[in-house]
Image (spheres, rainbow, N blue to C red):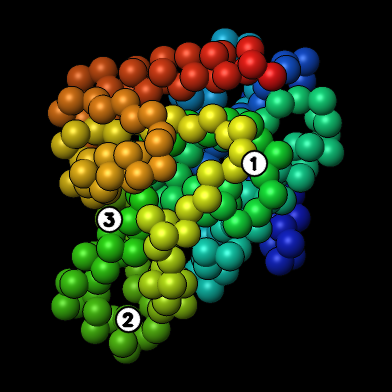
């Protein structure tokens, strides 16, 4: 594990996979409450490495091995951290073509990033995209105990099934309320995009992903019966294979 200093002054832990001689490098962004060491992030990185593609996977603020506190888990900070990682990659490997792989909340951030920054990446593969992340958090906060905790303390602690307890502050929730990807997304010219989504996803509903893909002309791969974690049958095998195929296909066009 290596560390990069963020634009806000805290450390961004990251892992580079590859020899350094590859033509393509993929930046991997994880989901809400997950980390750069998730099964998705690590096995996709391994699949890419075996296919001759390098990768960098990193932790969002307050996730995984990030030393940042919950107050730093803000949408703008997540965008800046992805930007910092990309700038580091571009500085270290100026000749490489950059791609993105992201899951769930990471895909939400990736799509915002493509719309609001000046990405140098040329392709992005999005798994179980949380295209309506504000509604996902709103549904979560319908729990009366959580809502009362937020009112009393200004934050809630999310720890069910997460890598470590995640302090989610009111300010993060307020950030989300200002965002509508269906309204705000702008596809950069020349950007190759592909989505893959489980038809049984109850966290980030398949219908939302399908509507987003249709609106913006993005290729969508449905995986029948797969849930948000892609734990059924060989669903993650499909993700890894389709991701590698996507990067190989679009890398040839560079």
Q: On the picture, is 95 further left or further right than 180?
A: right
Helix, strand or loop for disc 1: strand
The answer to whether any part of residue 77 appears in the image is yes
Give the position of the N terminus as an image quadrant: top right
**Quadrant location of residue 183?**
bottom left
- Residue receiving disc 3: 160
Distance from label 1 to label 3 (Cα)? 24 Å
Q: Residue at x 77, y 20 (%)?
A: 20
For label 2, the crowd category at 10 Å Cα-Cα, with few meaning under 14, some 14 to 19 and many 20 or more, is some
**Disc 2 element:** helix
- Of residues 68 and 215, the one nearer the viewer is 215
Of the image marks 1 and 3, the number of the one nearer the N terminus: 1
Q: Which mark is residue 150?
A: 2
The quarter of the rendered structure image containing the C terminus is top right
Residue located at (20% from left, 20% from top): 233
The label shown at residue 14 is 1
Residue furthest to the bottom: 152
- Residue 116 location, quadrant: bottom right
Residue in the image at 56% along x and 52% along y: 115
Residue 128 in the image, given as x and y percentages of width and height: 34, 39
């Amino acid at each position: 594990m290596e560390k990069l200093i963020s634009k806000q002054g805290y450390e961004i832990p990251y892992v580079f996979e590859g020899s350094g001689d590859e033509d393509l490098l993929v930046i991997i962004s994880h989901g809400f409450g997950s980390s750069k060491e998730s099964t998705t992030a690590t096995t996709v990185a391994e699949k890419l490495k075996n296919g001759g593609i390098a990768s960098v996977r990193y932790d969002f603020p307050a996730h995984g091995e990030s030393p940042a506190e919950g107050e730093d888990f803000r949408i703008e900070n997540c965008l800046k951290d992805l930007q910092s990682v990309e700038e580091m990659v571009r500085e270290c490997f100026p000749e490489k073509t950059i791609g993105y792989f992201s899951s769930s909340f990471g895909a939400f951030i990736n799509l915002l990033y493509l719309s609001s920054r000046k990405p140098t990446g040329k392709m992005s593969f999005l798994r179980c995209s949380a295209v309506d992340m504000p509604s996902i958090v709103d549904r979560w906060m319908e729990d009366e105990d959580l809502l009362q905790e937020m009112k009393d303390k200004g934050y809630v602690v999310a720890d069910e099934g997460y890598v470590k307890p995640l302090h989610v502050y009111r300010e993060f929730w307020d950030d989300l309320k200002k965002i509508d990807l269906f309204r705000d997304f702008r596809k950069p010219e020349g950007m190759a995009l592909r989505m893959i989504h489980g038809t049984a996803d109850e966290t980030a509903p398949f219908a939302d992903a399908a509507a987003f893909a249709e609106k913006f002309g993005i290729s969508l791969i449905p995986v029948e019966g797969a849930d948000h974690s892609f734990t059924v049958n060989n669903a993650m095998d499909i993700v890894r294979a389709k991701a590698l195929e996507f990067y190989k296909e679009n890398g040839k066009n560079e």
